[in-house]
Structure formats: structure tokens, C-alpha cells
């Protein structure tokens, strides 16, 4: 497969993921207005849809940023930390969003609530997950990128001091 064909496929994939993410997120947030809410309030189907949208958008951004990097350039430690931080943010958002459903939330008692309930703690956890994702994307984007050397080359290296 030619490099241009591979780049075209990557473009289609990240644009499709971005579009799917925005559509899923838009439907999840506006389900009440569209008449698609099956339960009153923000239900678990909407929550799962919102989390899938967040995942799709995150993947699209990382595919786009990876595509902009030069081929064959080594990935820096900062970029690795960024990817792992974003992945951790996604896991945290999923755990927070589905906390009642998996039994670790604060609204799981059947006598108090008829169904799982997305409360302020869950929304706060999702917000912290999104912040972690954004910081991870920022770290990945500001890492080595198109440079062949690290942006931290001004720091002394132990190997350089041995040569003196």
C-alpha cells in the first residue's frame, strides 16, 4: 500500500471517528429535546453514549496528531506520558459515568431510586477524566513532534559530563 493511500485511510478514519463522536455526544446531550429519552433524566444509555462519544473524539484527535508527526521519528517520553494520561482519563470517565451501574456509586440502593442516577459526583469524575484527557493530548502535541531532538536538550546529561 502506498504512503498516500495509507494517509487517505487515516484521514477517513479520524474524520469518521470525530463525526461519530460529535453525533453520539449531541444525541446523548439533547435526547430530551429530540424525544429519544427512554427514562426521565440522564439515563445509563445516554451516559454510555456520551462515554463512547468521548472515546471516539479522543481517538480521532490522537490519530490526527500522530499523522502529523514525521515518519520514523522516535516518540519521546513526554508523548508516552500524554498517551497514558489520556487513556487513564478515559478509564476514570468510564468508571465515574457507570459507577452506579457497576455498583460502586452512591445511588445504587433500589429502595431510594428506581434506577441508576447520574449525580454530581459522577459528573465531577467525568469532568476530571476529561481534564486528564485534555492534558494528555496537550503533552502529546507539545512533545518532540516534528523536531528530531527533545525540547529538553538544554538539560545536562550524565553521559555528557563523563566525556569532559
Image (spheres, rainbow, N blue to C red):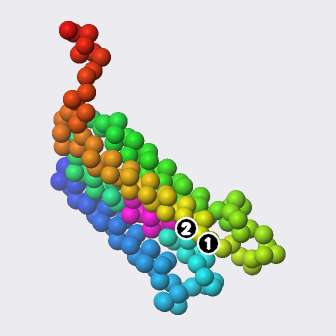
* In-front residue for pair 135/68: 135
Q: Which mark is residue 118?
A: 1
Residues at discs 1 and 2 in contact (Cβ within 8 Å) = yes
* In-front residue for pair 65/160: 160
Secondary element under disc 1, as helix, strand or loop, is loop
Q: How many marks?
A: 2
Q: Is residue 146 located in the magenta-colored stretch of the structure? A: no
- Percent position of residue 20, x then y: 39, 71
Q: Judge from the rendering whether residue 90 lies leftward or rightward of residue 158; answer left or right.
A: right
- Quadrant assignment, res 58: bottom left
By secondary structure, the bulk of the magenta-drawn segment is best described as: helix
- Quadrant assignment, res 143: top left
Residue pictured at 18% horizontal, 39% vertical? 147
Q: Is residue 56 located in the magenta-colored stretch of the structure? A: yes
Residue 80 at least partly seen: yes
Secondary element under disc 2, as helix, strand or loop, is helix
Magenta residues (range) = 51-58
Q: Is residue 52 above or below residue 71?
A: below
Q: Is residue 100 above or below residue 30?
A: above
- Percent position of residue 156, x then y: 25, 22
Q: Is residue 143 above or below residue 102?
A: above
Residue pictured at 71% horizontal, 69% vertical? 107
* Disc 2: which residue: 123
Residue pictured at 18% horizontal, 43% vertical? 146
Mark 1 vs mark 2: which is more N-terminal? Answer: 1
Residue pictured at 48% horizontal, 79% vertical? 29
* In-front residue for pair 66/78: 78
- Percent position of residue 115, x then y: 71, 76
For marks 1 and 2, give the CA distance: 7 Å
Residue 97 at least partly seen: no
Q: Judge from the rendering whether residue 147 lies leftward or rightward of residue 30; answer left or right.
A: left
Image quadrant for the C terminus? top left
Amino acid at each position: 500500500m502506498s504512503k498516500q493511500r495509507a494517509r487517505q485511510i487515516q484521514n477517513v478514519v479520524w474524520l469518521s471517528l470525530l463525526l461519530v463522536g460529535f453525533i453520539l455526544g449531541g444525541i446523548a446531550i439533547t435526547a430530551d429535546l429530540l424525544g429519544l429519552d427512554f427514562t426521565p433524566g440522564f439515563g445509563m444509555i445516554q451516559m454510555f453514549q456520551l462515554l463512547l462519544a468521548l472515546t471516539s473524539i479522543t481517538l480521532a484527535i490522537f490519530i490526527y496528531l500522530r499523522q502529523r508527526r514525521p515518519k520514523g521519528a522516535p516518540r519521546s517520553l513526554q508523548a508516552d506520558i500524554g498517551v497514558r494520561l489520556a487513556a487513564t482519563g478515559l478509564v476514570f470517565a468510564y468508571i465515574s459515568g457507570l459507577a452506579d451501574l457497576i455498583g460502586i456509586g452512591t445511588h445504587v440502593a433500589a429502595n431510594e431510586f428506581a434506577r441508576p442516577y447520574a449525580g454530581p459526583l459522577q459528573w465531577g469524575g467525568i469532568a476530571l477524566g476529561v481534564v486528564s484527557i485534555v492534558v494528555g493530548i496537550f503533552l502529546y502535541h507539545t512533545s518532540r513532534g516534528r523536531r528530531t531532538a527533545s525540547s529538553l536538550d538544554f538539560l545536562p546529561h550524565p553521559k555528557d559530563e563523563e566525556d569532559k
